[in-house]
Amino acid sequence: MRLQPGDLLKRICCGTSGRAYERLVSALDRLQATTIKTNIRASAKSRKTTFSWIDSYTHLVDERTQRSLGMETRRFYVKCHGRHVAQL
């Protein structure tokens, strides 16, 4: 999933200060580091699964200006009411 950090920060009403960008990067670090283990039971079978909310992310930054050029995440899970509803 590709995104512009500034657009995301505006959309979720977090402002676009340098501190907001730092908090976004910290949040992505936590999402990548968090490991989820679950078991899903259906029809007399069970499946044990381990995953992270995101596999990885890349943040491109202009070295001269230090401005963000965009971000990309790999395998981003979306949950709603505890159920996995989408994988982006």
Image: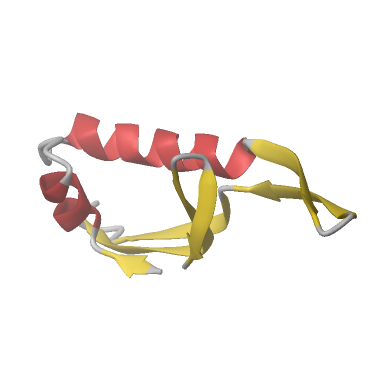
Position of residue 29 relative to residue 62, above or below, is above
Q: Farthest residue to the front: give it.
A: 43
Position of residue 10 relative to residue 61, above or below, is above
Near-viewer residue (30 or 35) = 35
Picture residue at 46% right of the left edge, 60% below the top: 58
Tell me residue 23's x, y (percent): 32, 32
Tell me residue 34's x, y (percent): 62, 36
Picture residue at 24% right of the left edge, 54% below the top: 5
Position of residue 68 relative to residue 88, above or below, is above
Position of residue 60 relative to residue 12, above or below, is below
Picture residue at 70% right of the left edge, 49% below the top: 51
The picture quadrant where one finds residue 42 is bottom right
Colour option used: secondary structure
Near-viewer residue (11 or 22) = 11
Left or right side of 53 for 60: left
Image quadrant occupied by the N terminus: bottom left
Left or right side of 22 for 18: left
Tell me residue 21's x, y (percent): 26, 40
Tell me residue 22's x, y (percent): 31, 34
